Structures are given as structure tokens and as C-alpha cells.
Amino acid sequence: MLKKISIITLLTACIVITTGCQDIEQQNDEVFSRYYLTSLKWSKSADVLPELTRDCEIITQNESVVASWNQKDDSSQIWFNIVTFDEEKLTANRKYAFMVDEKAKGFAIAPTQKLRFDAELVLPADILDEAYTSENEKRISVMKYIRTIFAEDIGQLSPDSKELEAAGMLVINSLNQCIYPLEQTPGLAKQLPKESGMEFDHMNFDAGRVRMLINDDTAKIKIKIGSVVEDFDTQLDVQAM
């Protein structure tokens, strides 16, 4: 059962540590439901912290970044929500949600793997004001910025947890796998805004797809790898970006 949640994204309640209580699909829904409830440039840190303390997730935070995360006892599944805040306005300026399941069951109950990462960010002026030669160059620059800033954000928290650090490395590795083909063939960047996204290969999870949208001063990115890639362009969360 979902617990009361506020306008801020921060991960699921009542999962696994002692009870192993929820099916992974329900857990997935809760992680990303909370992600969607955060509004960049509006949700404030004061809305987040009281909600976090009510959940049985693990909370890790510093002055401007807060994470709610957990994992299954056998470490085959790990998930997090992370929100960062503008230090002056105290409003959310970046949000991330992630889940990996290395022992998911496929249609024929065979083991599969799946990974999903969503992010939305307010872009800084130096990214927005750059004189790009093309939209593709801008898209590649934004994706590299997402990789850089996520690494900085997770880096502020990961010393407190090897598990959170490992999850962050999976995200950075996935972003690297997206960026590599763009560096080799920049024209592929034109596929990023499409509902079908851009296909790429991941060394551990096989096929993946990424979609990225840039609207005014914000960017949204969605990465799916493994068994969740099938029919990517018809999935409601992809279409609703």
C-alpha cells in the first residue's frame, strides 16, 4: 500500500529490509511515482524532509542533496530517488530516480535484467548560452552535462554508502554507453527527442534506449536497458515525457 507522499520525489515506503514485502513491479511504480511528484523550481526542501523520515527507506543527505534508497537483501535489486536543491532559493533544481533488477523474471520466467534511470534538471546559463553549431551538438553537450552533474551529486552522498556508490556507478556507466555512439556519430543525436529514442548497447545489460528532451532551461532524460526496452515508444512514461 502506498503511504502518504508529498510533492517531492523520494522513494518508496516500507520495502524489503525486514519484510521483503513488495513485488518488484509495485516497488518500481512507487519509486517513479514519487519522482513525478517533484516540481523543479517549485518544490522546497522543507516539503521533503518530513516525508523522508516517515518511510523505512535509508536516508542519506548533505546540505543540498538528499537521497532515499534501499536494496534487496541479496543486492539483486537497488533503487534510489535523489533531489538536489538550489542553495539560495531552496527549491528543487535536479531530480533523479533509478532502479536496477538483475534477477527479474521474463515472460517465460527466465532470468532477465533491467535498468531504468529518469532525470530532470535545470540547465545552467553556460550550457544554455553556448553558441552551438547545431541542435545535435547542443543535445550531446547537455547529455555530457547530465553525466557530469549527476556524478557530482552522487559523489556528495556515496561516501556514506558503498551500495549507493555502486548504484551511481551503474548510472554513470549507462550514460557513458549513451554518449559513446554520439561521439562517434553525432548525427545520432537527432533520434534523442523521438519517442523511439536512440538505441545503444550496454556491455552488461544488452540493448538499451535513451530519450532526451530539452525545453527552455530544463532537460529530461530517460534510459531503459534490458527487458524493459521492448516497445519503448509505446510505453506511457516515455510518451508522457
Image (tube, rainbow, N blue to C red):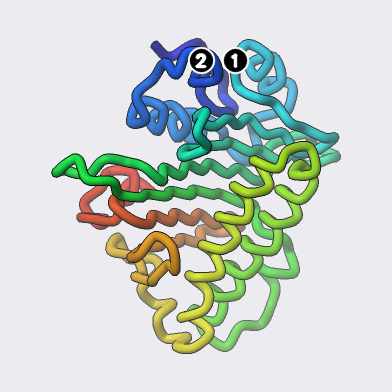
Residue 111, x across and y down, in percent: 28, 46
- Towards the viewer: 110 or 158: 110
Where on the picture, by quarter, is residue 192?
Answer: bottom left
> Observer-nearest residue: 128 or 222?
222
Q: Is residue 9 visible?
A: no
Residue beneath the point at 83% across and 40% down: 87
Give the left or right position of residue 223, taking residue 55 as reference: left
Asked if marks 1 and 2 touch (Cβ < 8 Å), the reply is: yes
Query: Mark 1 packing: few (<14 Cα in 10 Å), some, or many (20+)?
Result: some
Is residue 17 shown to the viewer in this render?
yes
Q: Quadrant of residue 7?
A: top right
Q: Position of residue 38 (x, y in %)?
A: 56, 33
Note whether 123 is above or below 200 in the view shown: above
Where is residue 50, by image quadrant? Answer: top right
| Pointer 2 residue | 14
- Mark 2 or mark 1, which is nearer the start of the sequence? 2
Kindly identify the residue that appears in the image at 47 percent across and 31 percent down. 31
Amino acid type, residue under disc 2 in the picture: Cys
Q: Is residue 47 above or below residue 180?
A: above
Q: Which residue is mark 1?
A: 55
Local packing at callout 2 (Cα closer than 10 Å; few below 14, some 14-19, many 20+) is: some
Q: Secondary structure at mark 2?
A: loop
**Gap between marks 1 and 2 measured at Cα:** 6 Å
